[in-house]
Image: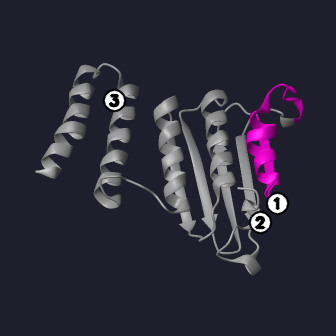
Amino acid sequence: EEIAAHLHDSVLQTLALIQKRSDSPDEVARLARSQERELRRWLFDGPRGQHTSVPAALATVAAEVEDGYGIEVDLVTVGETDHRCDALVGATREALVNAAKHSGQKRVDVYAELSDTDAQVFVRDRGRGFDPATVAADRQGIARSIRGRIERHGGTVDIRSSAERGTEVALRVHFDTAAHGSEPTEGTAQ
């Protein structure tokens, strides 16, 4: 009964929306991706879909940006860490939002590599690119939400961008292995 109720309230409603919007392939694809994620979360993480891992947090952020901006995020995560990575997840979200808003592309790739000693996330689009040195001072996305957030936690940010190749944002944080189990270097001020 619980499964039937959930399928009625989610999958069947989404299928009805897809029928109504069949003339918009982008909207149909967005709805299908969103529903697939929600159903997988419900099936594998339980009805509440709560995440406790960094890969799950990154997947949630990717899904939110996909839904909010109508793009596709291809996320690959390798490894896991016991450390909290709130700053890394937040900076990843901002890099995804920037790519969604400014790259002109409908797809963004994210690769995350996690371990007990460090975590790295690479956000890449193949869009129009930009010169990071010419970003206006009043634009705070890169300065505060990405670079500032990561650097406050002992990490580094490398942004490479060109008109021919798009943009890649590399985020790296290192953990204080002596304090394993407590807040990492990345999270001394979480």
Q: Are marks 1 and 2 in contact (CB under 8 Å)?
A: yes
Name which residue lies at 29% across and 53% down.
47
Amino acid at pointer 1 = Gly
Which quarter of the figure is the C terminus placed in?
A: bottom right
Residue 41 placement (x, y as % from top left): 35, 53
Mark 3 residue element? helix
Residue 163 placement (x, y as % from top left): 75, 33
Residue highlighted by disc 2:
185
Residue highlighted by disc 1:
154
Residue highlighted by disc 3:
28
- Residue 77's image quarter? bottom right
As for residue 15 lying within the magenta part, the answer is no
Name which residue lies at 67% across and 41% down.
95
Q: CA distance from mark 3 to mark 1?
A: 42 Å
Which sits earlier in the primary sequence, circle 2 or circle 3? 3
Q: CA distance from mark 2 to mark 3?
A: 43 Å
Mark 2 residue element? helix
Viewer-proximal residue among 53 and 106: 53
Which sits earlier in the primary sequence, circle 3 or circle 1? 3
Amino acid at pointer 2 = Thr
- Residue 123 circle label: none
Amino acid at pointer 3 = Val
**Number of marks drawn:** 3
Residue 121 placement (x, y as % from top left): 66, 56
